[in-house]
Amino acid sequence: MQEATFLILTALATSSQHGYGIITDVKKISGGRVVLGAGTLYTALDRLRADGLVVVDREEVVENRLRRYYTLTPPGAQVLAAEAERLKANATVALTRLKLAGGTA
Amino acid sequence: MSEMDGLERRYARLLAWYPEPFRSEQGGEVLGVLMAGAEKGQRRPRLREHVDVLKSALGMRMRGVGRSQAWTDALAQFSFVAPLFTVVVYVLDVAFPYHPSTTSRIDGFPLHLVPVPSLLSQPGFRVLLISQVVIAVLALVGLRWVALAALVAASAGFGVVINADYLPDQLKAIAVSFAILEATALIASPGPRRGCHLVNWGHQVVLLLLAVAVQVSTLAYEAAAYRFTWPMPRSLGWGQVAISVALTVAALAVVAVRKLGWHFPLLFGALLYAYALLLATTPAASSSSDLIGSPTLVHLALLFLPALLLASFVIVNATLSKHHRRPGPELA
């Protein structure tokens, strides 16, 4: 899973969000390291919707413009949980080995 | 006109790179996100935004976003199923080869005494079979571009052996149609991995029924052509042809009952058209008018025009919307 996809799913883990909300949340989650462009965001959302990991939760009209709120589906939550576990396991192994090698960790 | 109006208009123009259906559904939404992210006093889209939107829009066009979902799905299914189908056809051809009847005689000579060469012993057939298995495996694991490279390489190899007399005509016809349509499906569809998700047991039943229909009619064709020892044309085994037709009708019934749509059978129709034409013309064929053994341009057009037309239609359909660069209604 690409980092941008992981961060988008993470942004939707607690509540539904609209497009710009996801972008600002991803920036916050990543400590300002990842700044999604609108194109990148909607490419990812298009794929996630096609795979059934994300759905449109509701729609609002703000300043004469449609605003959609996206939310995780149960399979989306499972995929995110599995990916988080995988990253956690990898990070644990890396940190353990660095300690054994007397590294900086 | 305010600065914001000008920026919004320029963003809208940038979004025209997206496929029209995507713009209709989500153009306003993306525009809202771009406007929300714009800096105060910004008059034009930034370079980073240009690159981001262009990359996203071209990616969506490549993946077929915005084309008819049924058509896109059928192509994806075909890219996954067609290599398996051809492997099954070849395996059936090896498992149930043509054997002359013990009562068949020509000028008093019993045909069954004449040995029929095993297909597996023929180098040309081995090229076909191995390449189809490789392409099928690559499609199964979802490596569409590697599968396409393998298909191109296999087609080049096949081009070397296509005039070999020992290769059954029907396999040549299916192999050429397959190369045209599978390459198209791999290029223009979302790919075999997506196709794998969309294939259900109905597709599998259709695939099996058609493969058996091909093999049964192949036996009829071999009985009529019997090219290895006796080039004189003979009549088709009409009983076997009737069974093939019944199996094809059963496959179409499964398509109708399971509501598999008409795009998928249309692709298989184009795949099997050259084969069916070859079968239909067998009684009248002679070595000098062999449709595929020594083909003329007219022969090739007759055999492969439907597949080429369908492939062209799909490619044009995939790229046509690239020229529709005017903004959608809500973006203008």
Image (spheres, grey):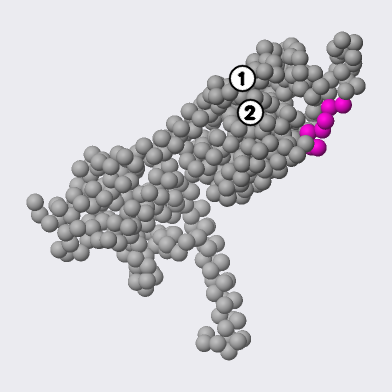
Residue at horizontal 76 percent and vertical 14 percent from the top: B232
- Which callout, 2 or 1, points at the residue further toward the start of the chain? 2
Q: Residue B81: image x %, image y %?
A: 61, 37
In terms of image quadrants, where is residue A26?
A: bottom left
Q: Which residue is farthest bottom?
A: A102
Magenta span: B115-121
Q: Residue B141: image x %, image y %?
A: 61, 49
Q: Viewer-proximal residue, A58 or B294? A: B294
Q: What residue is pinned by disc 1?
A: B277
Type of the residue with mark 1: Leu
Above or below, B92 against B63 in this view is above
In terms of secondary structure, where does tag 2 sit?
helix
Q: Residue B103: image x %, image y %?
A: 89, 13
Q: Which residue is farthest left?
A: B1
Alpha carbon separation for disc pair 2 and 1: 9 Å
Q: Viewer-proximal residue, A58 or B14? A: B14
Type of the residue with mark 2: Ala
Q: What residue is pinned by disc 2?
A: B173
Q: Chain of mark 2?
A: B
Q: Residue B318: image x %, image y %?
A: 41, 38
- Residue B242 seen in the figure: no
Q: Viewer-proximal residue, B189 or B21? A: B189
Q: Let me know if marks 2 and 1 both belong to one chain.
A: yes
Above or below, A79 against A90 in this view is above
Q: Chain of mark 1?
A: B
- Residue B281 seen in the figure: yes
In terms of secondary structure, where does tag 1 sit?
helix
Answer whether residue B119 is magenta in the image.
yes
Q: Could you tell me if the residues under marks 2 and 1 are in contact, i.e. CB atoms within 8 Å?
A: yes
